[in-house]
Image (cartoon, rainbow, N blue to C red):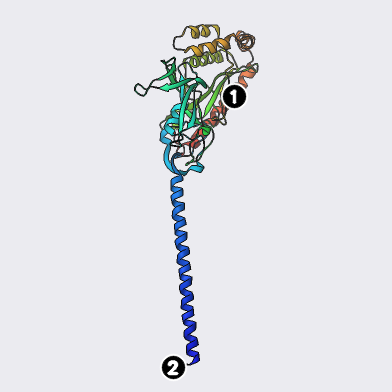
């Protein structure tokens, strides 16, 4: 049947539209295919660049002690992993190590070209000629000298966070530090209720214990001790702290407690570190009396390095002169400054009352 020109024109337009639609559909399919191919290639590339790393499971504050149970495995892009990253078990164990006499065992890392993972090397106080190796059978550490093993006795110290860190933060060397609290055989947990405490002191904070005399002199007795506030029956004790103390620290603080009691107007008090992970421990300036010094010198529980440090402090001309001029002189006077003593007593009482109110405000809201 013959068609008129209008019908032929309509049929041609329809065929042309179909052809254009097919071409466009083909182009779209081709583009989608290419896009999917690119996405798959990118996914494969990203999958190859991902690595399992340890991240924090909770928020931590500067100075908080870090333990292995505070971390979990997570996937992270290689480009986001710090260059000083290391496995948690390796990192924490290395940073906690000291020798028995308090010498640091430092850790350094090199890259394994085959696995692209860091390899740990331990050195005695950073000395590359004194690499510390571990006997995998006994677990003991040794230094290899002239092909002979020289075993060393080790002690540990807690690993702490340098700065505040949020959950899911990747652990690395730059975020951690070792505490100055070395766990040697003579370390014991001691409890004290004769130290005036900061109002807002909580478990996990670090303090210096200081002795203040009525003549204005102020001495550091022990430095950077991590405290625990005892909780009895659901209530925190207002005036009591627990601290891990070595034998020499126990004797020094005991001497200071007795002398604070003897000197009218003296005060034994604590000051809190604000950024414990970054701040170095203060150097003690308090010098014990002759009787305690002789006891320390003969005490077998005090490690040799501590004895040497105490001897150097006691025999320091400046500190010894300060001891003679201020502490011994004040002990001789027996504290006749009654006005100052009254003010100190009032200050201590006021601080204790304020601290009690602060701890009561925490009841039920803070877990220790």
Q: Which residue is mark 1?
A: 346
Q: Residue furthest front?
A: 2
- Label 2 or label 1, whichever lies nearer to me, is 2
Residue 26 lies in what quarter of the image? bottom left
Instruction: Give x and y (percent) for residue 200.
Output: 54, 32
**In front here: 4 or 236?**
4
**In front here: 83 or 129?**
129
Q: Is residue 253 left or right of residue 217?
A: left
Kindly identify the residue that appears in the image at 47 percent across and 6 percent down.
298
Instruction: Indicate the quadrant containing the C terminus: top left, top right, bottom left or bottom right.
Output: top left
Instruction: Give x and y (percent) for residue 107.
Output: 49, 26
Kindly identify the residue that appears in the image at 45 percent across and 73 percent down.
22
Give the crowd class for mark 1: few <14, some 14-19, many >=20 residues within 10 Å.
few
Instruction: Give x and y (percent) for residue 252.
Output: 52, 14
Instruction: Give x and y (percent) for residue 177.
Output: 51, 29
Q: Which residue is mark 2?
A: 2
């Amino acid at each position: 049947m013959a068609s008129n020109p209008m019908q032929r024109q309509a049929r041609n337009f329809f065929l042309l539209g179909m052809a254009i639609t097919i071409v466009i559909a083909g182009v779209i399919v081709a583009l989608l295919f290419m896009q999917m191919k690119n996405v798959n290639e990118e996914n494969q590339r990203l999958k190859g660049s991902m690595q399992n790393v340890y991240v924090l499971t909770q928020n931590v504050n500067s100075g908080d002690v870090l333990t292995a149970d505070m971390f979990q495995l997570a996937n992270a892009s290689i480009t986001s992993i710090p260059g000083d990253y290391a496995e948690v078990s390796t990192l924490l164990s290395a940073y906690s190590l000291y020798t028995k006499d308090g010498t640091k065992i430092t850790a350094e890392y090199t890259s394994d070209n085959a696995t692209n993972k860091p390899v740990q090397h331990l050195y005695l106080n950073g000395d590359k000629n004194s690499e510390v190796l571990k006997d995998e059978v006994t677990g003991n550490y040794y230094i290899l000298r002239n092909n002979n093993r020289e075993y060393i006795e080790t002690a540990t110290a807690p690993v702490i966070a340098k700065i505040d860190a949020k959950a899911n933060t990747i652990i690395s060397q730059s975020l951690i530090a070792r505490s100055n609290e070395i766990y040697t055989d003579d370390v014991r947990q001691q409890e004290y209720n004769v130290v005036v405490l900061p109002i807002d002191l909580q478990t996990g904070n670090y303090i210096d214990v200081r002795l203040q005399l009525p003549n204005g002199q102020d001495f550091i007795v022990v430095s950077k001790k991590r405290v625990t506030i005892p909780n009895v029956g659901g209530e925190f004790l207002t005036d009591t702290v627990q601290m891990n103390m070595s034998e020499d620290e126990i004797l020094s603080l005991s001497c200071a407690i007795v002398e604070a009691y003897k000197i009218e107007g003296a005060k034994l008090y604590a000051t809190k570190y604000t950024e414990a992970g970054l701040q170095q421990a203060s150097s003690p300036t308090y010098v014990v009396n002759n009787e305690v010094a002789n006891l320390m010198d003969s005490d077998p529980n005090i490690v040799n390095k501590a004895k040497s440090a105490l001897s150097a402090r006691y025999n320091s001309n400046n500190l010894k002169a300060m001891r003679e001029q201020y502490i011994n002189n004040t002990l001789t006077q027996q504290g006749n400054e009654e006005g100052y003593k009254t003010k100190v007593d009032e200050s201590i009482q006021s601080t204790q009352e304020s601290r009690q109110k602060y701890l009561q405000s925490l009841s039920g809201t803070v877990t220790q």
